[in-house]
Image: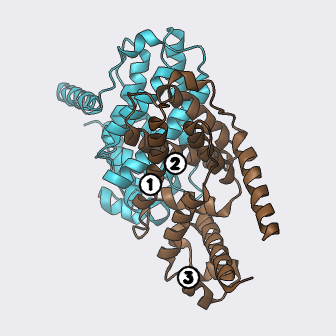
Chain colours: A brown, B cyan
Amino acid sequence: MAQQDRAIRTRRVILEAAASVFDELGYDRATIAGVLERAGVTKGALYFHFASKEQLALAVLEQQVIDIAVDPQKIKLQELVDAGQILSFRLRTDPLQRGAARLSVEQGSDRVDRNQSMTSWSAFVEGLLTEARERGEVLDSVDVRETAEMVCGAFAGLQIMSKVLTNHADLCDRLAVFFQHILPSIAVPALLARLDLDPERGAKLDAEIQARALAGEEVA
Amino acid sequence: MAQQDRAIRTRRVILEAAASVFDELGYDRATIAGVLERAGVTKGALYFHFASKEQLALAVLEQQVIDIAVDPQKIKLQELVDAGQILSFRLRTDPLQRGAARLSVEQGSDRVDRNQSMTSWSAFVEGLLTEARERGEVLDSVDVRETAEMVCGAFAGLQIMSKVLTNHADLCDRLAVFFQHILPSIAVPALLARLDLDPERGAKLDAEIQARALAGEEVA
């Protein structure tokens, strides 16, 4: 493995360890020592990548959005549904997603700019809605920014509720209910029946992505 | 003032002090000593009403739901909108609502049963939707329990987003956007145009309620 690849892997190991510590303890109670122990890396390795706990938290929040890349679909609005369902599925087990979710809604330390996280997600959804509008998929009555922020805000709450009640086990179902309610006032009617809102879709898409990543690694 | 009235007032003073401490510090960092100082009551008075910090938190969460009583409306779904808008308006300044909001979404201490808070709100909304259905206001496709939980979960997230970005100043607007998106898939079409979704409605209704309470006190 090339040195650069090793560095990328180490960075990822540290990020996931940090995320799982944030998930368990929250930002305030998390410590660099705890992250080091979980990651099994040296202090030097950690500080090579991240200067502080604050930077670790920001990197976890940033990676969360990067990790949710979805395959292009014929209907752009389907990609919005897919991103939501993949995220919801991964919140069950993916340490990075779980840690980021806790950081992004936790009130407490003001050193983590949660504003940034909300803004990144809103920009991501706004981008999808804008493309969908250009393709004629979105009703004229929709203000894409307003709707994007509403979707992100509501999602944050649905994931908290699902975490409290079932440790995220029912989040895909809750998200499907949410999409069923909002899409009729977003999508043009002719598209509605062609969208796949199946709550199992997140698990299916995640499996496809994992299989492809594995195949890619084997080729490399 | 009768002794019972005094006890009720003292209880309320303690509850509001506790809520404002929870709002500022969160559950874990809040202390009974801090609540005593803010309430300006004796330790004996506090322990007469509440046995522990945990009980204070539970009482704040319980009072939150009781405080959001709305006037009956011709259209039952309007009461759902009104409850949401009054709550959103009060989150700007009402210490009890602010403290309860933080407690209900904060991850951390497992001693506060946030499950209970989510369940109370869902039951409240489900009750309104069930009455609305009995009056023929709700589409057949709606599962009232599922929809009630979706509304409560989404609201929790919208209030977090609004708190992070504007300290709740824009929550009434965000909630109006949410209602605009979901009501077309809840209400029968003939009712839609008759619902008042104005984001200023919370402020207006709150002023009416306060004025009435004041008039009632003067009469007493």
Q: CA distance from mark 2 to mark 1?
A: 9 Å
Instruction: Name the disc covering residue A49, or none.
Output: 3
Instruction: Characterize the local packing of mark 3: few (<14), some (14-19) or many (20 or more) Cα atoms within 10 angstroms.
Output: some
Q: Earlier in the sequence, mark 3 or mark 1?
A: 3
Q: Which residue is mark 1?
A: A118
Q: Locate residue A68 relative to residue B170 in the image: left or right.
A: right
Residue B84 x, y percent position in the rendering = 39, 32
Q: Are marks 2 and 3 on the same chain?
A: yes
Cβ atoms at labels 2 and 1 below 8 Å apart? yes
Mark whose residue sits in front, 3 or 1: 3
Residue indicated by mark 2 = A156
Q: The N terminus of chain B lies in which quarter of the figure?
A: top left
A43 or A203: which is nearer to us?
Answer: A203
Query: What's the distance in space between the residues labelled 3 and 1, CA to CA?
Result: 24 Å
- Can see residue B13? yes
Amino acid at dot 2 = Ala
Residue furthest bottom in the image: A44
Disc on the earlier residue, 2 or 3: 3
Check disc 3 and give the amino acid type.
Answer: His
Q: Residue at position x 75%, y 61% from top?
A: A213
Could you say which is closer to the camera, residue B172 or residue A185?
A185
Q: Is residue B59 above or below residue A67?
A: above
Q: Residue at x 41, y 57 (%)?
A: B22
Residues at marks 2 and 3, CA–CA distance in whole angstroms: 29 Å
In this orientation, which residue lies closer to the viewer: A66 or B20?
Answer: A66
Disc 1 residue crowd, few under 14, some 14–19, many 20+, Cα 10 Å:
many
Q: Please tell me which of labels 2 and 1 falls first in the chain.
A: 1
